[in-house]
């Protein structure tokens, strides 16, 4: 039968925004489980009582930050989708459906800087609390991964060309007249670099690369001579980075791979498809049985995996007030058997009895489950490429990705519970229906 057309002009006068939504939707359930008053209380001191423009609601900003990593969206895409999604708006505490933008995309940047790493740690701890008893296990699995930075694959020629561009822009901004801009020369040399893999043009391409480096050094030295004292203090850190890039050799330590992210490290994790990754090292701690991320820590330097474990355990103790009983790790952590009250289990550890050997084997097999968790962090929650700037941005991205992972875990769990409840209800109704039908059938006597 063809359905009747609904009247689009009919209004719902006696229902609220909350009543119009599906109360079993995971975002609806999550919005009512999070303790939003905790964020409002802790972040309130970051705002002035009398001065400045009135800020946006704290729940709105925290909700937007969480939705960004839950749905793997950019700031701009999040603002656009928020206007179209009623569940996004309810999650952020809106009393009714809003057709306008919640805020400008740049306001999310300012809010992240305002609450800093300590605010992100508070959000992460709330995500662990939401998981209840699952997040209170004393046995954890630990591993490290690389959080890649949003930079292009570094080559020397790329860096030299960027130095030239930035030097010319600085000279133009400060009103300095250079002896030569080299714009046409660089264009010609860049064309010659295209043939560096050709046998006939390799010599020409290498010569062009050397010429680009020479021009970059010439412009940097000229800038250093002609910049006034007031402007020299402003541009001194940038010029020092330029000089370090021009002076570094192939096998030097602490090389610079990006001009706008000079702290980026070149890390090799032994992957066949990706030999080197450019970013920073991250330690992830996940509960053994339930799979809740209870620790997420970013490191500035490329330390040995065993040296990252004490700070990770210290973060766990600072968050929850207790120490980990057992930490199960891979061979990258070998050489450390105990840290404080925590026993470190690596594949080299051997049991004395048959029961202990089987227990260690099962624990190491279970440890591999952390690899799937890290994959979800990278592919679903924006850990695969970090778009936040500087070292602070590294720490913020790790904590938000881990918090989104924990929230998403509970959303899936609630969804499965609802499905199980509905299937059980249908099953019971079928039993009652069959029982009533059988009782109505008269008994046949032979």
Image (cartoon, helix red, strand yellow):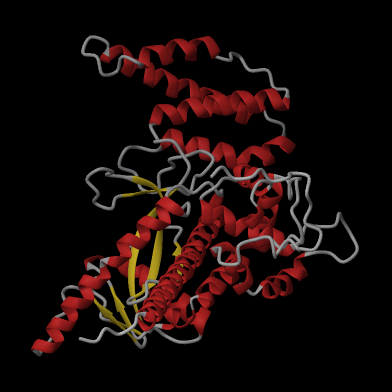
Residue 302 visible, this angle: no
Instruction: Identify which residue is drawn at 41% across, 53% down.
Output: 378
Q: Position of residue 257 (x, y in %)?
A: 43, 40
Q: Is residue 198 left or right of residue 68?
A: left
Where on the picture, by quarter, is residue 341?
bottom left
Where on the picture, by quarter, is residue 115?
bottom right
Q: Position of residue 402 (x, y in %)?
A: 47, 63
Give the total of numbered labels. 0
Front-most of 341 and 335? 341
From this viewpoint, which residue is outermost toward the left?
Answer: 354
Q: Position of residue 358 (x, y in %)?
A: 13, 82
Residue 363 visible, this angle: yes
Front-most of 181 and 131? 131
From this viewpoint, which residue is outermost toward the right?
Answer: 50
Compared with residue 190, is residue 295 higher up or lower down, i.e. above or below? below
Locate the C terminus by quadrant: bottom left
Q: Position of residue 411 (x, y in %)?
A: 49, 66
Where on the picture, by quarter, is residue 393?
bottom right
Compared with residue 195, is residue 334 higher up or lower down, i.e. above or below? below
Instruction: Identify which residue is drawn at 44% across, 33% down.
Output: 246
Q: Is residue 220 left or right of residue 88?
A: left
Front-most of 11 and 378? 11
């Amino acid at each position: 039968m063809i359905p009747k057309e609904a009247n689009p002009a009919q209004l719902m006068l006696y229902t609220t925004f909350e009543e119009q939504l599906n109360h079993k939707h995971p975002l609806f359930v999550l919005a009512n489980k999070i303790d939003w008053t905790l964020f409002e209380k802790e972040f309130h001191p970051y705002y002035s009582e009398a001065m400045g423009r009135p800020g946006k609601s704290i729940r709105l900003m925290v909700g937007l930050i969480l939705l960004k990593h839950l749905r793997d969206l950019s700031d701009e895409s999040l603002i656009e989708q928020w206007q179209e999604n009623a569940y996004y708006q309810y999650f952020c505490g809106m009393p009714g459906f809003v057709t306008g933008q919640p805020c400008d995309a740049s306001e999310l940047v300012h809010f992240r800087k305002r609450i800093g790493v300590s605010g992100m740690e508070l959000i992460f701890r709330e995500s662990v609390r939401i998981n209840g008893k699952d997040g209170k296990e004393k046995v954890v699995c630990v591993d490290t991964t690389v959080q890649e930075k949003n930079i292009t694959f570094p080559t020397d020629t790329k860096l030299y060309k960027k130095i030239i561009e930035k030097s010319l822009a600085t000279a133009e901004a400060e009103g300095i007249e250079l002896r030569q801009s080299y714009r046409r020369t660089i264009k010609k040399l860049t064309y010659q670099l295209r043939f560096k893999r050709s046998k006939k043009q390799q010599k020409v391409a290498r010569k062009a690369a050397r010429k680009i480096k020479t021009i970059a050094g010439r412009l940097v030295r000229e800038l250093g001579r002609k910049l006034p004292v007031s402007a020299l203090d402003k541009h001194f850190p940038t010029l020092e980075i330029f000089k370090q890039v021009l002076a570094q050799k192939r096998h030097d330590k602490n090389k610079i791979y990006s001009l706008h992210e000079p702290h980026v490290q070149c890390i090799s994790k032994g992957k066949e498809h990706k030999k080197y990754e450019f970013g920073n090292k991250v330690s992830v701690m996940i509960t053994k049985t339930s799979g809740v991320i209870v620790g997420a820590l970013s490191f500035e330097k490329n330390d040995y995996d065993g040296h990252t474990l004490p700070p990770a355990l210290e973060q766990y103790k600072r968050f929850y007030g207790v120490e980990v009983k057992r930490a199960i790790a891979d061979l990258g952590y070998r050489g450390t058997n105990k840290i404080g009250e925590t026993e470190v289990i690596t594949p080299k550890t051997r049991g004395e009895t048959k029961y202990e050997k089987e227990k260690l084997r099962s624990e190491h097999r279970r440890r591999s489950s952390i690899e799937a968790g890290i994959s979800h962090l990278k592919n679903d929650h924006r850990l695969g490429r970090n778009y936040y700037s500087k070292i602070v941005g590294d720490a913020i991205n790790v904590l938000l990705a881990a918090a989104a992972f924990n929230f998403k875990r509970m959303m899936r769990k609630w969804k499965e519970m609802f499905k199980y409840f509905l299937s059980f209800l249908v099953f019971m109704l079928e039993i009652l229906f069959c029982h009533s039908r059988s009782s109505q059938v008269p008994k046949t006597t032979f």
